[in-house]
Image (cartoon, helix red, strand yellow):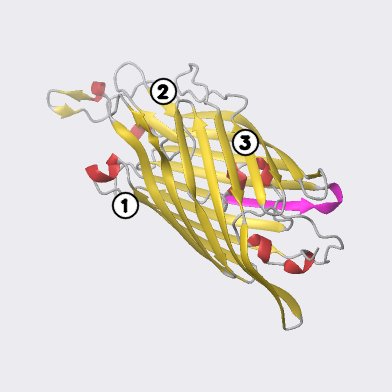
Amino acid sequence: MRQRRRTYLIYFFSYITIQSQDIQFSQFYTASLYQNPAFAGSAHYLRGSLHHRMQWPGLDGKFSTYMASLDGYLRLYKSGFGTYFIQDFMGSQNISTTELHLLYSYEIELNRKWTLRPGLQVGLGQRYLDYSRLRFPQNYDDNGYIAGSPLPSINNSVLFPDVSSGFLFYDDFFWIGYSVHHLNRPNLSLLNNIEKYPLKHALTAGYKIILHQKTTLNYATTDKVEISITPTVHYKFQGKADQTDIGIFGIYDWFLLGLWYRGIPFKTYEKLSYVNHESFIIQTGFRWDRWTFNYSYDFTLSKLGGIRQTGGAHELNLTYILRPIRKPQKPTKRLPCPNFQRNIFLEDLQH
């Protein structure tokens, strides 16, 4: 599965064909609102996040993605709210996609152990093509490029609505989530024809294993030192493409380390004669007060890495959680996902 929202194959003859796929983040938990709308409000605090991914900087066709998100939780209504803005550029920024989404989730306590969180997402996006920077056959003659020659009549922008949904099912240690994006199958064509966005399905699961946990008193506040490992799997498919991330997170108090493999090693593309090995990913992060910082790097394993040095992929995430003015009287069950946000304000987690 290609790792970016849009794969564009442009034929400079009588038509242009554009095939679309979503962005694939390596840090799928730090960009959780993009992954599944059911994550809205999952931190149970007001949370703001900035995220950036730079893929294949060593190639001319590099991809660059920027995302900003904000979400919170209303305990009285057991509801999570969120929004995120995302902008994606391909190549020399002549192809871009900009989106703004609103998210809602509702927390259902099935019993004392299990919780269900369904979520809904609605948004508006714009695809933009700066074709003035492209060159077509009619722009050339026997002497070369014809300056000032006319460009073909192509729409350079299209707006599209987008609807997605998902759910999370979890207890204190295990969780599983499923999401479906582009339920309305929006039309993204720039040629006034039909190019429906393919559905994207994603399944995520994990289990948190506590190796050590100790509560201490530090300057009259309660602190909890946690050592844990969390095996996770993240499978997604869109159209004819699919991909799996499988790996493990390790947390030692304020420090996080994650290792994953991306690919489906038992799947071979017969027509292309290669095995689905895509990348090996390492992530590291740390927590300081109400701030968390994460960095990850993708080592390219596919044949693309052997053809030319891609430069891999870099991801950065900065997250801030605002502590509420009043301490909640009743603790709320948190998702056991592998991040620091569950450990920032632990005084309301004493069951």
For marks 3 and 1 on the same chain, the one whose residue lies earlier in the sequence: 3
**What secondary structure do most residues of the magenta stretch adopt?**
strand
Vertical arrangement, residue 282 with respect to residue 268, above or below: below
Dividing the picture into quadrants, the one containing residue 178 is top right
Furthest residue to the left? 143
Q: Amino acid at mark 3?
A: Ser
Residue lying farthest to the bottom in this orientation: 219
- What's the amino acid at mark 2? Ile
The range drawn in magenta is 68-77
Tag in front: 3 or 2:
3
Could you tell me residue 154's position as x and y percent? 41, 23
- In the rendered image, residue 136, in percent from the top left (x then y), is placed at 27, 25
Q: Nearer the viewer, residue 40 or 260?
A: 260
**Earlier residue among tags 1 and 2:** 2
User: Residue 179 at x, y = what percent?
Assistant: 62, 36
Tag nearer the camera, 1 or 2: 1
Q: Secondary structure at mark 2?
A: loop
Towards the viewer: 311 or 267: 267
Q: Is 214 above or below relative to 301?
A: below
Can you identify the residue that label 2 sits on?
154
The residue located at (82%, 48%) in the rendering is: 78
Residue 1: x and y, percent?
Answer: 42, 35
Mark 3 residue element: strand
Reading the chain from its start, which is encountered first: label 3 or label 2? Answer: 2
Q: Quadrant of the C terminus?
A: bottom right
Find residue 311 and name its label: 1
| Disc 3/disc 2 C-alpha distance (Å) | 34 Å
Q: Which residue is mark 3?
A: 179
In the displayed structure, 109 sits above or below 1; it is below
